[in-house]
Amino acid sequence: MVELLAAVSLISALAVFTMAATTKGKKMMRSAVCQSNMHQLGIAFSQYVADNQAYPPGSVWDRHLASYLGLENSSKPMKVLRCPEDQRKRPDARSYTASSQKEDNPGYGVFSEDSETMSLRPNQIERPARTVLLSEYFHKDNAQCKVPYAWTHGWLSESNVPKLPDGSYYHGNRMNLLFADGHVESCKGEEIYKVPGVKSGRWRAFQP
């Protein structure tokens, strides 16, 4: 009987371990898909910039990228704009938001806040590998090709970084970010702000 109980306990432990490993593996896979989405968006941004010498307006950036993503128009939901970790019901959910400029803080952010103002040019960004273009934001009103939440002013501190209902970041203890040089990075909240000698961390495009 003792041996039987021990065997049952071992099987139960293995089942729990396997389930945990499977769950972790699925989360890693979803994060990888999200990073792939961002990488594709980074390529589209590069192509847009090559044609226009500046980044698109922040309020409608995804609408401007549609043709560079191989889409004839932006009226249909684009899978590349949705992280698989984003569980909102709406089919047009947009998981990403552009890092916008602040009038009272020159050098902060990359994108304009409206469709009339010019976003930055690539040569204005002093540290492309450390300047965020897109971050993740699963806000209920963040929808594809819509103005609300197309851009944000970044997050003022680590405590403001958006999280899932259970208190975790969108990918465990990390969130995915697209940088101005085109690379995608999975960062812990505090890593976004720790750039030696640079106020506002990775949200800052240049020092005024």
Image (tube, rainbow, N blue to C red):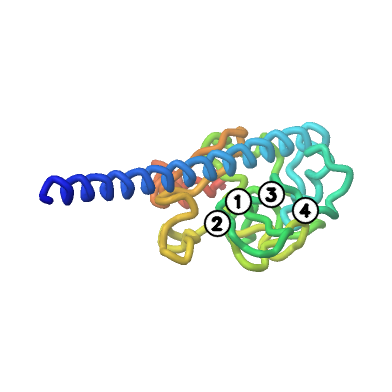
Q: How far apart are marks 1 and 2 (CA)?
A: 8 Å
Tell whether label 1 touches label 3 (CB within 8 Å).
no
SS category of the residue bearing label 1: loop
Q: Marks 1 and 4: which is nearer the front?
A: 4
Q: Marks 3 and 4: which is nearer the front?
A: 4
Going from the N terminus, do you reach mark 1 or mark 4 first? 4
Which of the numbered marks, if any, corresponds to residue 1? Answer: none
Pointer 3 residue:
81
Residue in the picture at 82% in, 37% down: 70
Q: Distance between the residues labelled 3 and 1?
A: 20 Å
Pointer 4 residue:
77
Residue 23 percent location from the top left of the image = 43, 48
Residue 134 percent location from the top left of the image = 61, 48
Tell whether label 4 touches label 2 (CB within 8 Å).
no
Check disc 2: other Cα within 10 Å, few if <14, some if 14-19, many if 20+: many
Going from the N terminus, do you reach mark 2 or mark 3 first? 3
Q: Marks 2 and 4: which is nearer the front?
A: 4
Pointer 2 residue:
154
| Residue type at numbered disc 2 | Gly
Residue in the picture at 70% in, 64% down: 90
Check disc 3: other Cα within 10 Å, few if <14, some if 14-19, many if 20+: many
Asked whether residue 184 appears in the rendered view, the answer is: yes
Tell whether label 4 touches label 3 (CB within 8 Å).
yes
Q: Marks 2 and 3: which is nearer the front?
A: 3
Going from the N terminus, do you reach mark 2 or mark 4 first? 4
Residue closest to the far front: 1
Q: In which quarter of the image is residue 182?
A: top right
